[in-house]
Image (tube, rainbow, N blue to C red):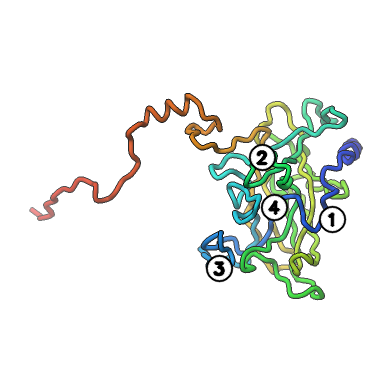
Amino acid sequence: MKKILIYAIISILSLFISKSVRAECTAAHTHIGINPTWRPADWNNPGQEHIDSDPTDNNKLWFFSLPPIHDSATPGWPNWEHANGNTFLALTLVKEEGEFITKPSDTSKKLYTCSFTYSKAEGYGDPNGPDHINGWHSAHGPQGAWNLESIDANTIPAWDIYIKRERTSENLLEDDFFTLLHDDSAAWENNGDMYSLGKRWLSDFEAWGIHEHMGFYFWLDDEDEDIYIVFSAHDNGGLYQRSADFTIHFAKTVYQPVAGDLNGDSIVDINDFEIMIENWGKSGIYKGEDAEHHDHDHDEE
């Protein structure tokens, strides 16, 4: 089969296998936990006070990226995006011996993957930052509020988490997206496909959880600039409720916010200066007491 041949070609690249057994993982995962509306009151002291806007959803699954307390926190946590909504996850061409790989059934499409390094301090391209995005991990958050149930190493938890591929962006065919596991086998080749995340004892956290590496791959033509995938998380064990749909956006070109950039193009130039001049002296501050007061006669005739 053509797909099998392509997977064999991709396996030569070994983009992420070497990182799958390290205790201190150098890849950024999408986390899966429970209690989606729980937040620390202060991220600088996540072990202290908290805010929970909906105590009724404590058993509901949810996805999130790297929290603000992390050294490589995602700028728009809990989503994989910048704080202003711009796409955060950058795509790069996959090459073999310097040549890009084309889709067997459509040679106008080339193979892309999401493999870049990032840290909160240095931004994109920081060699000391983790690779994005490279798999799934269970949540081990502040005060244990997001943790999946875990009693001890000898008691296997009841939960059995799987992820469903709901759909992709309209500019993608179903087979334009797939993932490769650490052994180079393919997963999520079609919308509606489900993948079970194996549970295991994580000695670093002294808890049962999930830790799975997975590369994201796309066949894209020259017109495909922005794409997305929609996932949902489920529990076959019946302990937790289905998550809300979670959309992950990817782009060939990403625009990170820059101080002074007023038009959102990630460049500070004359266009931003013109916007500033056009709006010089304007104020967006409004106080109720500034309203003009009127006397009203409410007497009936």
Residue 172 in the image: x percent, y percent?
Answer: 71, 36
Label placed on residue 21: 1
Foreground of the two, 196 or 290: 290
Quadrant of the drawing holding the N terminus: top right
Label 3, label 1: how far apart the Cα atoms are: 32 Å
Label 2, label 4: how far apart the Cα atoms are: 18 Å
Please name the residue that numbered disc 2 is placed on: 124
Between discs 1 and 4, the one toward the N terminus: 1
Amino acid residing under circle 4: Thr
Q: Secondary structure at mark 4?
A: strand
Label placed on residue 296: none
The residue at 55%/30% (across/down) is: 267
Amino acid residing under circle 2: Tyr
- 229 in relation to 50, above or below: above
Between discs 2 and 4, the one toward the N terminus: 4
Category of crowding for the residue at label 4, using alpha-carbon neighbours closer than 10 angstroms: few (below 14), some (14–19), many (at least 20):
many
Amino acid residing under circle 1: Val
Category of crowding for the residue at label 2, using alpha-carbon neighbours closer than 10 angstroms: few (below 14), some (14–19), many (at least 20):
some
Q: Which of label 2 and label 4 is nearer to you?
A: 2
Residue 116 in the image: x percent, y percent?
Answer: 72, 40
Between discs 3 and 1, the one toward the N terminus: 1
Amino acid residing under circle 3: Gln
Left or right of 27, for residue 76: left
Asked if marks 1 and 4 touch (Cβ < 8 Å), the reply is no
Label placed on residue 48: 3
Label 2, label 1: how far apart the Cα atoms are: 25 Å
Residue 182 in the image: x percent, y percent?
Answer: 85, 50
Please name the residue that numbered disc 4 is placed on: 30
Q: Secondary structure at mark 3?
A: loop
Category of crowding for the residue at label 1, using alpha-carbon neighbours closer than 10 angstroms: few (below 14), some (14–19), many (at least 20):
few
